[in-house]
Amino acid sequence: MKIEPVADRILVKRCDSTNISDGGIHIPVGSQEKSTRGKIVSVGVGKLLADGTRAELCVKADDEVLFESFAGQEVEIKNEKLLVMREADIMCIFREDNEGQLPELKMDKDIGKK
């Protein structure tokens, strides 16, 4: 079965959260914050505009993105948890640097830690 989001919706697989704190303490699964970083599985055809044309999406399949904390609707497809969200819920796209590496992301809770 192939899943295709409609309009400006996007299907995202959430990246795994780390289960070890900076201090090396194991964090139980129930206490972990859900990751707001994910990889796009598939995208819709774009939002239908008033003039009948479609707005092109800024993201594409396989892009790694950062999205809002409470974005999307969680669905389970073939025993895999995915998120269906709108393109507007995406805050940024991660691009590889010159060495082919994605940037490390520090969230508000991590900023200021040494």
Image: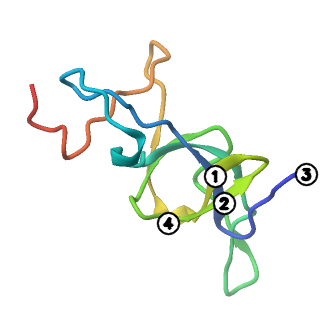
Vertical relation: 87 (above or below) 58: below
Residue bearing mark 2: 75
Picture quadrant where residue 52 is located: bottom right
Asked if residue 74 is positioned above or below residue 54 in the image, the reply reads above
Mark 4–mark 2 contact, CB under 8 Å? no
Whichever of callouts 1 and 4 sits on the residue coming sooner in the sequence is 1
Residue 44 sits above or below residue 2 on the image: below
**C-alpha distance separating marks 3 and 2:** 15 Å
Q: At 10% across and 31% down in the image, what residue appears?
A: 113
Q: Tell me, for residue 1, which label it has, or none.
A: 3
Q: Is 22 situated left or right of 88 in this image?
A: left
**Dot 3 lies on which element?**
loop
Give the amino acid type for the residue marked by disc 2 in the picture.
Val
Residue 5 in percent (x, y) is at 74, 62
Q: Do the residues bearing badges 3 and 2 touch, measured as CB atoms within 8 Å? A: no
Residue pointed to by mark 4: 88
Mark 1 vs mark 3, CA separation in Å: 15 Å
The mark closer to the camera, 4 or 2, is 2
Q: Which residue is mark 1?
A: 82
Residue occupying image coordinates x 45% and y 19%: 101
* Rendered residue at 87%/52% (across/down): 2
In three-dimensional space, the C-alpha distance between marks 4 and 2, rounded to whole angstroms, equals: 19 Å
Q: Nearer the viewer, mark 1 or mark 4?
A: 1
Q: Is residue 111 left or right of residue 69?
A: left
Task: Give the farthest residue toward the top.
Answer: 99
- Disc 3 residue type? Met
Do callouts 1 and 2 mark residues in contact (Cβ within 8 Å)?
yes
| Label 3 to label 4: alpha-carbon separation | 27 Å
What distance separates the C-alpha of mark 1 from that of mark 4? Answer: 17 Å
